[in-house]
Each structure stands twice: as C-alpha cells, then as structure tokens.
C-alpha cells in the first residue's frame, strides 16, 4: 500500500530528475550552438634554428582559446604538428634535415574545437644539429676499446651509431644522449687496428651520411697480477673470522659449490669490529706497484657450507643476507688523499617470494663485472668500501676481486 508520504517522496524524486535532465540538456544545447571560430594569430615571425625554427605570434583576444597548432611536413615527408598552450606565444618546430624553404600553417583551436583561419609562414631552417654533432666527434684509443666524445650545443636527443671494422667483421654500437658535452668508452675490443665510422640520427629519424673517423688501435688490456698485493691493516676492517680471511679477497680462488673447503672468502663479523657493522666497511689494498684501472669483477660467497668441510647446501647463497651488495671504489697514491672511482651496486634480483632468475645465478657464478666511467690515472692503493649487504647485521661476506687495466706501469 502506497502512503501519502511515499507519494510525496516519489513526486519529489521525479521532479528532481526532470530538473537535472533539463539542466544537462540546456548545457548541451549551449555548447552545441558555440560554433564561432576564434580569431587567427597575427604578427607571425620565424627565427631559423638548426634543423627547425622558432615561431612567435600574437594571440587573438578570444577568451576560450585552448592551443595553437603549427602543422607542416618534415624532411622525411611526414605530416606532423606542434602545439603551444594559450599561455604562450611561441612554438618551436623541428624535424628538418635540409636548408630548403618549408611552409608552416598556424591555426588557433578553442575549447569547443572550433578552428581559426590558418596563417601560413615559410621557414628556412639552418643546417641540422645532427651535422654539428657529427663534425665535433673525437675518438682516441683506450684500454680495451676507444673513447668517443662529442658536442651537442642544442642539447637535443641524438643517436650516435659507431661502426668498427677489423679484418674479420663489422661491429655496431648505438650511443644516445642529450647532454651538451658527452663522453663514452666502448670496450671489448682486441688490441688491433679498426676502421671507425659514425652516423648520427635525431629523434625524428633524420640521419647523416656515414662518415669515416679514423683507424685506431685500442690499448692492450691485461689482468692485474695479484702476487704483490698486501692488506693495509691499519685502514681496513677485520675480515678474519672463523675460516674467513681478508686476504682471501684476492687469492685468485673463487668460492664455488665444488670446492666447499677452499675457504676463499672474507668474513667481516661485528664482534671483531667493535660489536657493530659500522658502514662503510673499508678494505684497503696496497698493490706495491702502480696500475691503471678500467674495469673489474667481484664474486659473492657461493654456498652456505654444512657438516664442517664435508659438504654444502643445495641452494646457492648468492644475493642472501650476509653477502656484500653495494660498494664504492677509491684510488690513492699516498693513503691520505682518496679519489672516488665510482659507486657500484650488485642489485637484488629476488622477487616477492625470494626467487632468483637463473640468469642472475649465472651472473653471480661468472662474477659481477663493472666498468669505470673513465680509465684511471696511475695509482698504488685501492680502497674497496662496502656500503651495504643484503640485510645481515652480523656478518658480511665477499669471495674475490679481479682488476683489469695496465699492470706495473712504472717498470
């Protein structure tokens, strides 16, 4: 049974619904009848840029302007456009790989998608910045590779294709940057002569012609011999706990499951170091000679051993709590002034369930390889400064450190 109160509520809902519908319908009607196009831009001027142009203009007085669109065809024949908001009176266009005249059409778009009358202007860009980059490229031999440098004054993204060919095959590397000054080292080369060519590409796909840079021979890279290395005890943490010893870090014996009795790792225990793992934990090595360093490899402890020296666990110990994770490298010739060579992190590949991908286990078996940004000057002392582990507050392990560069250069 429907009461009078229920009828009142039903009538109220019906009236409210009709009012909402009327308001919405009125709004749609008002928007639909706004078909007046905005005014066009005026006083348009163009400033030629390398590979593009900067267009300035005055906006019309309409109060519902949304943006201004500049439409044109780039050097690859693609129809493209750039826009600027109603708060700006300039648009920068790019994508030109020539110095020919190009027509640009400027249109004002309002909030109701009405378009103004188009205004055309012809622009003639300057030589593209990709040629400026190519002309600035310099290359020189480096340890196990070459160093390449270039200037990019417009700070636009460029892709630098480097081709190097020996008697057997051609190799390619693609480098990318938008820095005003850039430097890369390409490694992994033998100490033989290569022909080096480069080609530059911009973000729009415009490319320079491939150009010959020169014939270069990378410097010979060698493994640094560890026979003369000694520990600088006074500047180092104590890594001698149980079967571990700090000097095991460079004994050329890598911890593996197959050799559970080799004791080829250090153990930094908090009880031997003031009762706390106070990071950074420094291990300072005296090479007793001068070296030049450009890359290195480190190994974690491999397995947790059980039953004394009679066996090891089936699960690898890589990336687990007590293994070292991140570290900094410093170089010195007097043990007082230290130069930071880089900050490094092995990373944590475990998923939320603690699973580790097979390729990351293999990476740990092979050793984690790191390259320096720049080859060092000659130095005698190395500080391996551990900055974190995978979580332990009691112990930190590490198995082996191997360096590559030029050995004993003062002889």
Image (cartoon, rainbow, N blue to C red):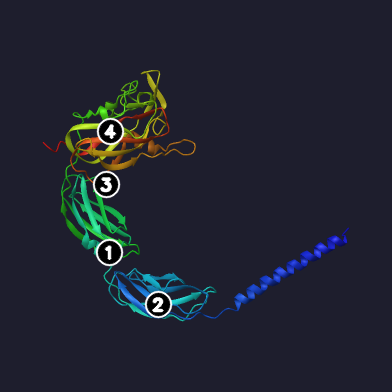
Alpha-carbon span between mark 3 and mark 4: 19 Å
Labels 2, 1: front one: 2
Look at mark 3 in the image and give the residue it sits on: 373
- Where is residue 24 drawn, in percent x and y? 66, 70
Look at mark 4 in the image and give the residue it sits on: 401
Mark 3 residue crowding within 10 angstroms, few (<14) / some (14–19) / many (20+)? few
Disc 1 secondary structure class: helix
Looking at marks 3 and 4 on the same chain, the residue that comes earlier in the sequence is marked by: 3
Residue 139 as seen in the image, left or right of residue 308: left
Look at mark 1 in the image and give the residue it sits on: 130
Q: Are marks 1 and 4 in contact (CB under 8 Å)?
A: no
Looking at marks 2 and 1 on the same chain, the residue that comes earlier in the sequence is marked by: 2
Alpha-carbon span between mark 3 and mark 1: 25 Å
Look at mark 2 in the image and give the residue it sits on: 57
Tell me if I can see residue 301 in this picture: no
For residue 253, which quarter of the picture? Answer: top left
Alpha-carbon span between mark 1 and mark 4: 42 Å
Alpha-carbon span between mark 4 and mark 2: 63 Å
């Amino acid at each position: 049974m429907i009461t009078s109160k229920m009828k009142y509520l039903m009538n109220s809902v019906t009236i409210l619904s009709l009012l909402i519908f009327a308001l919405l319908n009125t709004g749609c009607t008002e928007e639909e009848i706004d078909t007046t196009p905005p005014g066009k831009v005026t006083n348009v001027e163009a400033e030629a840029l390398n590979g593009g142009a900067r267009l300035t203009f005055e906006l019309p007085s309409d109060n519902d302007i949304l943006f201004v669109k500049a439409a044109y065809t780039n050097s690859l024949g693609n129809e493209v456009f750039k826009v600027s908001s109603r708060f700006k009176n300039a648009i920068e266009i790019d994508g030109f790989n020539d110095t020919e005249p190009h027509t640009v059409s400027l249109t004002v778009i309002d909030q109701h998608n009405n378009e103004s009358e188009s205004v055309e202007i012809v622009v003639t860009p300057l030589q593209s910045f990709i040629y400026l980059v190519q002309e600035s490229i310099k290359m020189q031999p480096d340890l196990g590779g070459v160093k390449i440098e270039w200037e990019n004054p417009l700070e636009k993204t460029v892709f630098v294709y480097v081709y190097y060919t020996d008697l057997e095959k051609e190799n390619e590397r693609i480098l990318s940057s938008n820095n005003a000054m850039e430097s890369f080292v390409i490694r992994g080369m033998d100490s033989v002569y290569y022909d080096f060519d480069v080609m530059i590409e911009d973000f729009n796909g415009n490319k320079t012609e491939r150009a010959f840079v020169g014939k270069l021979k990378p410097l010979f890279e060698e493994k640094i011999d560890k026979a003369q290395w000694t520990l600088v005890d006074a500047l180092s943490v104590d890594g001698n706990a149980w079967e571990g010893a700090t000097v095991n870090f460079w004994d050329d014996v890598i911890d593996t499951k197959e050799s559970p009795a080799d004791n080829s790792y250090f153990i930094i225990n908090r009880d031997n170091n003031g009762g706390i793992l106070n990071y950074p934990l420094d291990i300072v090595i005296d090479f007793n000679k001068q070296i030049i360093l450009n890359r290195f490899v480190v190994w974690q402890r491999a397995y947790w051993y059980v039953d004394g020296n009679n066996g090891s666990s089936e699960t690898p110990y890589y990336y687990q709590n007590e293994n070292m994770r991140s570290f900094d490298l410093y170089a010195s010739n007097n043990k007082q002034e230290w130069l930071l060579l880089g900050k490094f992190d092995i990373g944590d590949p475990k998923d939320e369930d603690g699973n580790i991908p097979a390729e990351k286990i293999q990476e740990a078996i092979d050793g984690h390889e790191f390259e320096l940004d720049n080859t060092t000057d000659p130095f005698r002392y190395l500080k391996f400064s551990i900055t974190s582990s995978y979580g332990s507050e009691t112990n930190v392990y590490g198995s082996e450190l191997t360096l590559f560069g030029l050995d004993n250069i003062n002889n």
